[in-house]
Amino acid sequence: MTRFWSPIVHTLSPYIPGEQPKQDGIVKLNTNENPYAPSPRVTAAIAAASERLRLYPDPGATRLREVIAKRYGVAAEQVFVGNGSDEVLAHTFQALLKHDAPLLFPDITYSFYPVYAGLYDIRYEEVPLDAAMRIEIADYQRPCSAILLPNPNAPTGIALTRAEIAALLAKHPDQLVVIDEAYIDFGGESAVPLVARHDNLLVVQTMSKSRALAGLRVGFAIGQRPLIEALERVKDSFNSYPLGCLAQAGAIAAIEDEAWFAETRARIIASREALVASLDGLGFEVLPSAANFVFARHPRHRGADLFARLRERGVLVRHFRKPRIEDFLRITIGTDEQCGRLIEVLRGLN
Ligand SMILES: *Cc1c(COP(=O)(O)O)cnc(C)c1O
């Protein structure tokens, strides 16, 4: 019975996450998780923190914000943390992106953005990617209240340079620019160094991908004080304790283990380059990726067919039934062995 629903609930079209299969033995390359375990220091820190489970966690996540601030060369007051960057983004939509003029984001991008816009009743316009599936900065030169871009973009994997982001900021001094850097650590240039000079820039990052903590749910935003304060006001009107003590302890340990981060990230980048070469060899067109996934299509095979064939043989990738990209597969970079399995199945095609 839906008669007890608030009216808005009838209008929502919720986000559909990638499948999390229950059976073992699946080569899971569909949700951009890290193929490596998080730093062993994370598990140790979580075990130690479990002695404090009886108590409420620090509502301000002070130590975590300090550690992130130090790592990124900003002040702790310029850092906001949340329960996954999805929550940070949700608060951003509510706190900073609801205005009379529309919010702009690409037509092919993270599919959660239109969902948040629906939830918070925010006007938006989609700006088409160009013919090469790139974000064209000049196309954002139109009336708007704010611009939201993932960098690198998802699901294309294509990155803008920091100079392009700086140019966008220079052209929009009176609009907020939000850069969602979920995949920045795999080859892009972060916009964080631009925060000091631009009061209209908010950079959002996650520990889910490059730090292998998708299950812990920790994301953060970096920006000048008034932007962070808006996020804090929404957070403290919603949930004072979005991050439990285990999440705070684990995230601190992950940021502090720079060597583990550097090594696993380098391995993923090396595997990506090898996978791109193999896909090239099989005749795929692969977009230039700066992320931990590639977006690829084959001139002679439909995306849906490739997806189904891989799935039958236990290899799960992501396929979007959407105009312009329905023949592409988004393939997460796994270990060399997992990527090898994918290539083996694709080699069997003719
Ligand atoms: C994965 C992803 C996120 C969300 O990550 P969390 O796990 O919620 O931190 C945000 N934006 C983009 C573009 C993503 O791909």
Image (cartoon, helix red, strand yellow):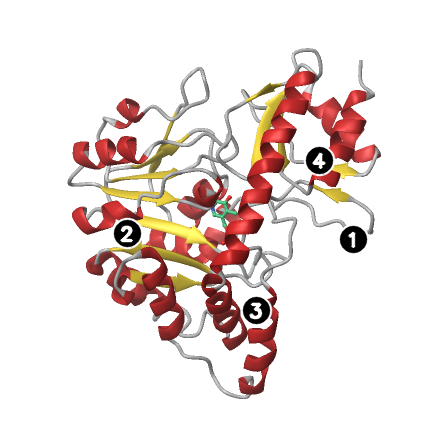
Identify the amino acid type marked 4: Cys
- Disc 3 marks a residue whose amino acid type is Arg
Q: Is residue 60 in view from this perspective?
A: no
The numbered mark, 4 or 3, whose residue comes first in the sequence reads 3
Q: Secondary structure at mark 2?
A: helix
Whether residue 100 sits left or right of residue 104 in the image: it is left
Location of the N terminus by quadrant is bottom right
The quadrant of the picture occupied by the C terminus is top right
Q: Position of residue 176 (x, y in %)?
A: 24, 44
Label 2, residues with CA under 10 Å away: few <14, some 14-19, many ≥20: many
User: Which residue is label 1 attached to?
Assistant: 22
Q: Which mark, residue 41? A: 3
Q: Which mark is residue 339?
A: 4
Residue 93: image tag? none
Report the residue at 81% width, 38% height from top. Answer: 314
- Residue 110 vs 305, above or below: the answer is below
Res 103 → quadrant? top left
The disc, 4 or 1, on the residue closer to the chain's N-terminal end is: 1
Nearer to the camera, 104 or 47: 47
Specify the amino acid type for callout 1. Answer: Lys
How far is disc 1 from disc 2 in space, using C-alphas?
Answer: 38 Å
Asked if the beta carbon under badge 3 is closer than 8 A to the nearest atom of ligand 1, the reply is: no
Q: From the image, state whether disc 1 or disc 3 is nearer to you.
A: 3
Provide the secondary structure element on which disc 4 rests: helix
Look at label 2 and name its amino acid: Leu
The mark closer to the camera, 2 or 3, is 3
Could you tell me how far apart the alpha carbons at marks 4 and 1 are, in whole angstroms?
21 Å
Taking 59 as reference, is 112 left or right? Answer: right
Taking the spot 68% from the left edge, 43% from the top edge, the residue there is 335
Q: Which residue is mark 2?
A: 96
